[in-house]
Image (cartoon, grey):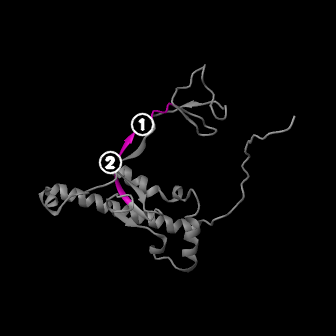
Amino acid sequence: MSSVNRSTSYANCVKVNRLGLTGSALEKAYGFISVEDYWDEISRPIRDFEREMMGAYTIGTNGRSAGYLVLFESEIYDPGYKSTCPKCGQLNYQLVSPASHSCGVCRAERRNLKAPLRWTRTKSSSIDQGMTMDDFMDMSLTGLKDRADLVLSFDRACDRVRNEFISAIEKYMVVEETVMVPTRVRRLERM
């Protein structure tokens, strides 16, 4: 894929109008993608793919409307957090101690993490960019097989993401609600 941001890699188009949905399912799908956290409901196949690849690859989105799932090189790292607040989820870089045990956000008591966190970050945005036919011809048979297996695993993961999306639009409905957010403002008042 080569896009507006010049990223090139293996990609699958997952635009809603290309998923084979019709009628009310298509309409529901457009409503579904307008929800901020819909990726939380369909990202399990991506996490499974990352585990299968032992963190060396991940799947992200690309395109103006995130209409493509793209294969990226990645790595697993420890972000360095030592404790968390069970009430609000705030992470902290320091261990809980008698002198410092309350959350800086909600003042609840923090807890030390049982194990280091494992986060995934993208290392590069292109795989096989700039490779010519001769470069592929020079690869060993094992190297070519490994690359083909990687791309096939990526394709299977993209199919599972698509299936999760279709399953989610069948299980959920989009509900619109008004949420009042209190805001502190300063204004002038005559003395």
Q: Residue at x 44, y 74 (%)?
A: 18
Residue 149: image location, x then y, percent: 26, 59
Q: CA distance from mark 2 to mark 1?
A: 15 Å
SS class of the residue under badge 2?
loop
Residue 124: image location, x then y, percent: 33, 49
Tell me the amino acid under the disc marked 1. Asp
Q: How many marks?
A: 2
Q: Nearer the viewer, residue 98 or 26?
A: 26
Q: Which mark is residue 78?
A: 1
Q: Residue at x 46, y 67 (%)?
A: 163
Residue 50: image location, x then y, percent: 38, 51
Q: Which residues are magenta?
A: 70-82
Tell me the amino acid under the disc marked 2. Ala
The prevailing secondary structure element of the residues shown in magenta is strand
SS class of the residue under badge 1?
loop
Q: Is residue 111 above or below residue 129?
A: above
Disc 1 residue crowd, few under 14, some 14–19, many 20+, Cα 10 Å: few
Query: Is 61 colored magenta in this rendering?
Result: no
Q: Is residue 42 above or below residue 109?
A: below
Q: Which mark is residue 176?
A: none
Residue at numbered disc 2 = 56
